[in-house]
Structures are given as C-alpha cells and as structure tokens.
Image (spheres, grey):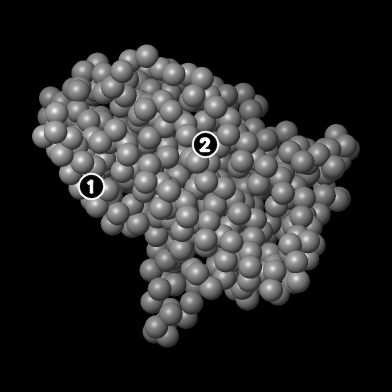
C-alpha cells in the first residue's frame, strides 16, 4: 500500500511538472524521487525495520506538501504580477561573461583548481602515510581512520583547501554543458574530490561532488535550450562526460565500502538480502544506507531525546566557527544514533530541523526551501547571471540531500559557495579582457 501510494505521488508530480517547471530535472522531481526511493526501499522490508508510527508518515507527507506549497506560492505570485511562467518558450541570445573568450580563461581556472585540490588530497595522504607507514597501511587501517575522524582526532593540516576541487567541478559542469566538450583533464577536480574523501573514509563529499556536477550541468543544458548557443547537441561527448564522472564516484564509494570495515552481517537482514553480502553495490550495508532513514526518523520522534540549541544543525558551521573562539561549546559533528535494530544515525533533514526549530520547523523550513529554490529557478533562467546560478545550485544541493541530512551542516558546502563567489568576478574580468582585446585585433 505504501509503495503504491508513493508511486501515485510520483505520477502526479510528473503530471504537474508539465505545467510548472516544464523540465524533468527540477527541484520538485529531485525532492519527490529521492524521497520515494528511500520510502519504497524501506517498504520492501529486506531488513526487520520497525513499522512506522502514523505520526511519522503524516510528518513526512505534510513536509512534502509544505515544500510543494512553497513552489506554488512563487508561481501564483508571478501570475499575480502578470509574469509569464513559461520561460522556456522565450528565446534568448545572451552569453556568459565567463565564456566570452571561448572558455580559455575557464579552462585555465579549472587547471588552477585541480592543482590545488590534488595538492590538498595528496598532502592528506602523505600525513596518513607518515602515520601508518605506507599506502597499504592506510588502506588496512581505514576503519581506524574513520573512527579518528568521527571522534575529531584527525582531520588533516589543510582544512577546506580541498574546496578548490569542488569549485573546479562546478566550472567543469558549466564548460561541458555549454560547449558540449569534455576534455581529458576535466576529470582532475573529481579525482581530487575522490582522493580526499577516500583518505577521510567518507562518502558524503563524493556524493556532493557528483550532485554538484550534474545539477549545474542540467541547469546549463536547460538554459542552452533557449538558443543560447548552437542547437545541435554533441550527445557523444555529453554521454562520455556523464559516464566518466559517475564511474569515478561509484568506484570511489566502492573502495571506501570495501576498506572501511563495514559489517555486512546484520541479524535483521532477510535471507534474500544476505545473498548479496559480497556484492559491492547491492549489499546489506548499502541497502541500510538507502532505506533506514524513515525508520531512524520514526525512532527519533518516539524518543525525542535530543536537546539542541536553536538552529544548531541548520547553522552548524556558524556554531562551530564561534566555538573556536571559546565563547560557546562546540556542536557535535555527528547526530545521535538510534537502534532500529542496528545502530545508525541518518534520519533525514526532518530530524534536524525538528531538533532546531521544534514542530513548526517541520513545515516552515520545507515551505521556505520550496519557495526559495523556485524563486532562484526563475531568477537564473531570466537573467543568466552567475550569482543566481550559484544560489540555485546551492538550494538544489540542499533539496537533493533532504532525504539524508541537512547539508548546511557541511562546512565544505559554504566554503565552496564562497570560493565561487570570490573567484568568479576575477575569471569573468579576465575572460572579458581577452574577448575585447581579440575584437580590437579583428
């Protein structure tokens, strides 16, 4: 029954999508289909999860409705001001200042970001090798390294320098979508992301890098469909780009999984799921990763044991920064774990916004998120300004992670966004300078 209801919602979303965003890849489909995946996998009960309380189902559904109402609010406001919501029917010929010189400045900047990102990753590996003796020693002790990271015992000596890798991924997505070309060195930023996250024995940052590329890529493709550049799509190059980036991300997650010492023997696993213990992709731990969140959220609402400061999860980075001055106690890096009947702490962003803002936050935050992401959807496609693309991408990333965590907890998100905002005017200025210089020559 749950699966049938979830599929029905997906079908309705696809129907409404024709009248709302017009494009398939948009905030509403991202939110709907990511949540639907977790709910349907949970409903398979390949692990002996406890049944969700009615209040948990109601909260998940009403938070989705709140997100949808936030979207509709923007459309209704635009209609009230006689603004045309069918923006993709309007043809445009505007170009991006950052690409005026044919992408030369952008390619050089990607090289710059790749070098710094790789340096940060290699330096972190060098520190680990000094500690464990060799690369093999590092791989054999990944479980220990993971425990050290969780406890805050080791984070490396170059904090946030690896953000250059994510900035590089952002601009690679722009270039690939706009020029329909994928240069071989474009893999370097993603490689830097992967190397760093393998060294920290994590997966969230790899997913962030992966989503960053595809969200920017599809946003640019949507803009290009309005006569921004040539209409013929070089599908071969774009398919290669998609396969390469996805392949790197999947391979990295598999390496982390196989070396992190993740337990695959769960007493709660069904016989069917236990048959896949040795599989890299379909295994008990991977199934738990993509299905346990509703059960953990349910357990959270039953116990209500978390007492956090106002906005401590949502504004984690701010609290953490202030804590470094000694003015307040540092917030906990990871959320409380729950037994369901295995220990895990991933409970969607609803757990975190409820702990931050109590029950009103469960509906106010999704509403504001839907409203903001839709506002910037129109803002970018109507102005094609890079600042609006950064805001839209940031909000889309937050929407993509809602089924996992409130990603605003991750400092790397904000460092990446601020880095793009800082460097973009310089790259645009250089690109415009060379463009004007070339015009004078011609």
Give neighbour class at mark 1: few <14, some 14-19, many 20+ (Cα, 10 Å): some
Residue 270, given in percent of the width and then of the height, sits at 84, 39
Query: What is the quadrant of residue 338 in the picture?
Result: bottom right
Query: What is the quadrant of residue 136 in the picture?
Result: bottom right
Q: Is residue 125 visible?
A: yes
Can you say which quadrant of the picture contains the C terminus? top left
Residue 349, given in percent of the width and then of the height, sits at 50, 51
Left or right side of 104 for 303: right
Q: Residue furthest bottom?
A: 326
Can you say which quadrant of the picture contains the N terminus? top right
Q: Which label was assigned to residue 430?
A: 1
- Which residue is drawn at the image coordinates 55% and 27% (left, top)? 240
Could you tell me if the residues under marks 1 and 2 are in contact, i.e. CB atoms within 8 Å? no
Q: Is residue 364 visible?
A: no
Q: Residue furthest front?
A: 441
Residue 355, given in percent of the width and then of the height, sits at 48, 62
Left or right side of 197 for 132: right
Query: What is the quadrant of residue 179 in the picture?
Result: top left
- Which residue is drawn at the image coordinates 52% and 61% (left, top)? 119
Residue denoted by label 2: 184
């Amino acid at each position: 029954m749950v699966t049938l209801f979830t599929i029905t919602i997906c079908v309705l979303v696809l129907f409404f999508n024709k009248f709302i965003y017009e494009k398939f890849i948009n905030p509403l489909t991202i939110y709907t289909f990511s949540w639907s995946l977790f709910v349907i996998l949970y409903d398979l009960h390949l692990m002996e999860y406890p049944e969700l309380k009615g209040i948990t189902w109601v909260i998940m559904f009403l938070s989705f409705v709140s997100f949808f109402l936030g979207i509709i609010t923007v459309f209704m406001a635009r209609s009230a001001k006689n603004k045309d919501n069918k923006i993709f029917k309007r043809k445009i010929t505007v170009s991006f200042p950052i690409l005026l010189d044919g992408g030369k400045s952008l390619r050089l900047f990607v090289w710059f970001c790749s070098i710094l990102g790789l340096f940060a990753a290699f330096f972190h590996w060098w520190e680990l090798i000094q500690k464990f003796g060799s690369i093999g020693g590092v791989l054999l002790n990944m479980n220990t390294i993971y425990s050290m990271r969780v406890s805050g015992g080791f984070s490396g000596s170059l904090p946030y320098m690896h953000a250059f890798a994510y900035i590089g991924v952002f601009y690679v997505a722009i270039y690939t979508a706009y020029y329909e070309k994928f240069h071989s060195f474009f893999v370097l930023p993603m490689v830097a992301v992967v190397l760093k996250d393998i060294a920290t024995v994590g997966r969230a940052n790899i997913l962030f890098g992966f989503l960053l590329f595809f969200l920017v890529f599809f946003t640019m493709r949507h803009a290009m469909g309005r006569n921004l550049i040539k209409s013929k799509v070089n599908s071969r190059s774009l398919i290669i780009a998609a396969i390469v980036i996805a392949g790197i991300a999947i391979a990295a997650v598999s390496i982390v999984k196989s070396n992190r010492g993740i337990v695959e023997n769960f007493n709660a696993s069904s016989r069917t799921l236990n048959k896949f213990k040795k599989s890299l992709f379909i295994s008990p731990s991977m199934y738990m990763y993509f299905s346990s969140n509703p059960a953990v959220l349910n357990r959270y609402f039953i116990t209500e044991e978390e007492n956090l400061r106002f906005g401590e999860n949502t504004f984690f980075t701010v609290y953490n920064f202030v804590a470094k001055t000694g003015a307040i106690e540092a917030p906990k890096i990871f959320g409380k774990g729950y037994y369901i009947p295995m220990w895990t702490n991933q409970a969607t962003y609803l757990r975190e916004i409820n702990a931050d803002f109590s029950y009103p936050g469960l509906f106010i935050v999704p509403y504001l998120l839907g409203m903001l992401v839709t506002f910037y959807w129109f803002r970018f496609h109507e102005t094609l300004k890079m600042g609006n693309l950064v805001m839209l991408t940031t909000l889309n990333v937050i929407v993509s992670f809602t089924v996992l965590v409130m990603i605003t907890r991750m400092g790397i998100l904000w460092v990446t966004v601020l880095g793009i905002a800082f460097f973009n005017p310089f790259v645009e200025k250089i690109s415009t300078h060379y463009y004007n210089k070339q015009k004078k020559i011609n």
